[in-house]
Amino acid sequence: MGAASPPSAREAWLASPGRALSGDFTVPGDKSISHRAVMFAALADGRSRIDGFLEGEDTRATAAIFARMGVGIEAPSPSCRIVHGVGIDGLRAPGGELDCGNSGTAMRLLAGLLAGQAFDSVLVGDASLSKRPMLRVMAPLRDMGAAVGSDDGERPPLRITGGRSLRGIAFDSPVASAQVKSAVLLAGLYAQGETAVREPRPTRDYTERMLAAFGWPVAFAPGEARLSGGHRLAGRDIEVPGDFSSAAFFIVAASLVPGSDLLLRSVGIDPRRTGLLEALRMMGADIRELDRRDGVCGPVADIAVRHAPLRGIDLPEALVADMIDEFPAFAVAAACASGTTRVTGAGELRVKESDRISAMATGLEALGARVRETADGMLIEGGRLRAGRVDSLGDHRIAMAFAVAAQLAGGEVAIDDVANVATSFPGFGTLARGAGFGLRSG
Ligand code: S3P
């Protein structure tokens, strides 16, 4: 449901304290890995099978975009895709706009990839994505010789003129962003010479790892990556692990709700994604990683969480990039901990699916928490939350974070505008209720 829907038509939840969380289950597949698996399988020679594919609106939009460009994609069963790759130069002109929905990952990665095609393309998104900054990818892509335009100079739609010859660049990214790094590297697949990216702090290296797994030579280390054009990708099978960002809501809820004891199976625990585990452990959480094994994009493990009293911390800035999607859940942990939590160096949160600093501060205050917003973070006084009404602003992670907060509140919490949870975590409500959450449609 878009931003234009009247409030009454928006999907809402009524959430309230349930029981101690328990169970042993998996969360849906990793969103970042699912996007990339479809993209690289589409550009590979031969067939790829993707198991554990996230059946979310974001990743389905990416699959639909490649189908529009002539890639055969079958869905023999839920969470499985068979992709018949067309080869690195095999995409066809889509004939119309390509809709990335709510997904910044889809739009930014595709901007890089489409910059190297022979045809023109236009990337559009929903109301939230249409407000997000794109100059961060347009500028380096232009340095590579790409023609990428936008009506207002910085936001979607993006208009890409094909048939340009791209050249590799050495790019020092001003922002710690896997999406920016990936956009440049994907344009680099089509560029003359070497493309190198350096980041101010290391971000998830899924593009690098997966390109390598599909057979493209890539040199990478934390904070830097290099590749050259002129190679090919070979189709292969991919097993997508559970999404740590989805598991995060259950990890925080089980830490907070007394008596909880939960096991989350087969979750990706790459260190560039799991800063939240470090932060929660600093707060006193009882979390164990069991049966650790290797996955296509880093380690995978079962995560066991038991309730433990949490105390506030000064969050080290070095952890911010490694938990960039987990702040809504982390802010709830802080609001229910004893003492004060300080977050700094997290200005990127203001340009996510919503301004997540403002959305969390406003919602937590509505539930009685004492929160002070700063330009690049927040100060949260831990305490007891009360019943109230909050607006998720159509942001999936804000909605789920407040469902967690409600488990600790003094009464019922109404959470407005939750339909976007389907972008990353279809079935959250059912899984959460099964684990013990008090949660129903409102
Ligand atoms: C993502 C990178 C991050 C993250 C997003 C997914 C990716 O965005 O917030 O949910 O798949 O590369 P930024 O690169 O903008 O930090």
Image: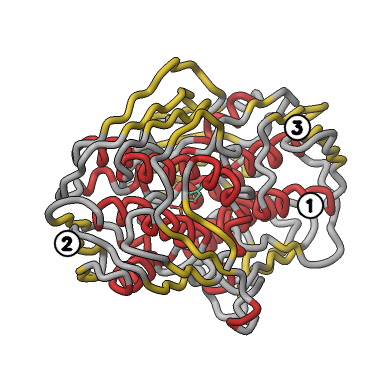
- Answer above or below: position of 122 versus 46: below
Pointer 2 or 1: first along the chain:
1
Per the image, label 3 sits on a secondary structure element best described as loop
Tell me the residue that label 1 is attached to: 64
Pointer 2 or 3: first along the chain:
3
| Dot 2 beta carbon under 8 Å from ligand 1 | no
Foreground: disc 2 or disc 3 = 2
Q: Quadrant of residue 213?
A: top right
Q: Residue 427's x, y, as percent? A: 63, 48
Callout 2 crowding tier (Cα within 10 Å): few <14, some 14–19, many ≥20: many
Q: How is the image coloured?
A: secondary structure
- Answer above or below: position of 151 versus 19: below
Left or right? Give the position of 338 relative to 43: left
- Answer above or below: position of 25 versus 313: above
Seen at 25% across and 58% down, the residue is: 335
Q: Which mark is residue 381?
A: 2
